[in-house]
Amino acid sequence: MLNMIVIKIFIMLALLMLTIMFYTLWERRFIGFVQDRLGPNRVGFCGLLQPIADAIKLLVKSMVIPNKANKFLFILGPIIAVITALSAWAVIPVNQTLVLANINVGVLYILAITSLSVYGIVIAGWASNSKYALFGAMRAATQLISYSIPMSFAIVGVLMKANSMNLTAIVNAQQGGITNWFFIPLLPLLVIYWICAMAETNRLPFDIAEGESELVAGFHVEYSAMGFALFFLAEYSNMILTSVLTIIMFFGGWLAPSTKYLLWVPSYAWLLIKVFMFMTLFLWIRATFPRYRIDQIMRIGWKVFIPIALFWLVIEAIWLDFTVGNIL
Amino acid sequence: MKIFYKFYKILLNLGLTDLIKGLMLTGKHLFSRKITVQYPEEKTPVSPRFRGLHALRRYKNSKERCIACKLCEAICPALAISIDSSISDDNSRIASKFEIDLFKCVYCGLCEEACPVDAIVQTSITDYHFENRGEQILTKEKLLAIGDNYESQITVNKENDAIFR
């Protein structure tokens, strides 16, 4: 039994690593296409071996630890970042039955674990003993903490609708075709959740934490080789995680959009297609919008998203009270 | 009316209309024709007057054009050319040593302008490299070899450029 779990974890992580590798390639090629370029297409067929070449380069290079850095914390930072990013995958259901840990507070677990990732960033920025890294870490911390709030409110809306914190149960609450998926009644919350997710993962247009033009690379400016790779791994793992969470909470997870047609398509294929679409949306938004300023980010987070999310929660509560009854 | 306009503006903002417009623009470019020139296979067009790697030319009867007049050596602003002259078997004056240091050369093309017999020319070769020290000095043999290899291209370039001279 224990062995089975270990094997499952290993397979899940291996698949995740593969996805991350090719996600980096897809990001570079996609942004190339948007900018009328071709992107990396030299290594292997269509550049498919490019991520492997990158990984080998990062593994082989030596890791430089700055003289005045706190060595213990400097190494601990990326480890925390990658552990929190990977352990959140434990409760993600891939299928009706296939999930590593089918716990009843899955959403709460994910919120708790992903909130811990701010420690990795702050510790890394602090231990680097560099002003750029410290600035980047401070910005990342403010951004992550402020955007956790509207994101949690958006998730609360989903929980009210699904009446459960178990991710499998949330998906099952959306059964019955595309009209029963949660993104139709919860559209404002979906938009808020998606934008907050982008801010949480430090992606453009919210990547002031690593703003190249003013902070070189932000909190990971002193990291090289494997330390840098671990931060990247964590960031991309978080991006895929938020894409999966979005489709689980708003787009019916592995469910087919229709209960009559296309029944021969297996459920994991639906999951993959939907996740791929949202992963691409990440890149599309990155390729389109310029970076926000820190005060603009704070203003949007506190003055726009939180009021709208609260407003919609009230409307949803009243509506559910009339239709379902006894929810409050 | 002003209040209505403000309300309309807020509605537009809430509908993320600006963001969707931007996404549509990049989405259009996603499927547009790519302008990348894939270098080793495809190359951008090069002017016939392009000043690339040097070459020494020969006459059709394979006699060297260079008469070691040293005009190019004199005009070279970077002092990259060094020439020694001697008398050949058929009693004509030729260069016994003709060397161009490519590290000094600034590719100005003045040597080509100065040459009275069109012996030294600059080809349109852009991509070359050195693997050992000293290889940057083009000796007379190397220059003649380049000239022999690219003679057809050099003549075509000269013909194309002739109408502008």
Image (cartoon, coloured by chain):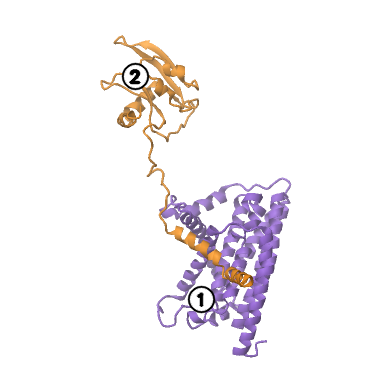
Looking at this view, is B25 or B107 the one in front?
B25
Q: Position of residue A232 (x, y in %)?
A: 59, 57
Looking at this view, is B30 or A113 the one in front?
B30
Look at the picture and state if B40 lies above or below A155.
above
Look at the picture and state if A216 lies above or below A172.
above
What amino acid does circle 1 point to? Asn
Kindly report which numbered mark, 2 or 1, lies closer to the viewer in this rendering. Answer: 2
Quadrant of the rendered image containing residue B135:
top left
Label the purple chain with its letter.
Answer: A
Label the orange chain with its letter.
Answer: B
Q: Quadrant of the C terminus of chain B?
A: top left
What residue do we see at 43% from left, 26% from top? B109
Look at the picture and state if A178 lies above or below B39.
below
**Mark seen at residue B117:** 2
> Helix, strand or loop at disc 1?
loop
Specify whether A231 is left or right of A280.
right
Q: Position of residue A219 (x, y in %)?
A: 67, 54
Quadrant of the rendered image containing residue A184:
bottom right
Chain of the residue under the numbered disc 2 shown in the image: B
What residue do we see at 38% from left, 31% from top? B49
> Extreme front residue here?
B1
Chain of the residue under the numbered disc 1 shown in the image: A
What amino acid does circle 2 point to? Val
Q: Position of residue A33 (x, y in %)?
A: 46, 56
What residue do we see at 70% from left, 65% from top? A145
Specify whether A309 is left or right of B20.
right
CB under 8 Å between discs 2 and 1: no
**Mark seen at residue A95:** 1
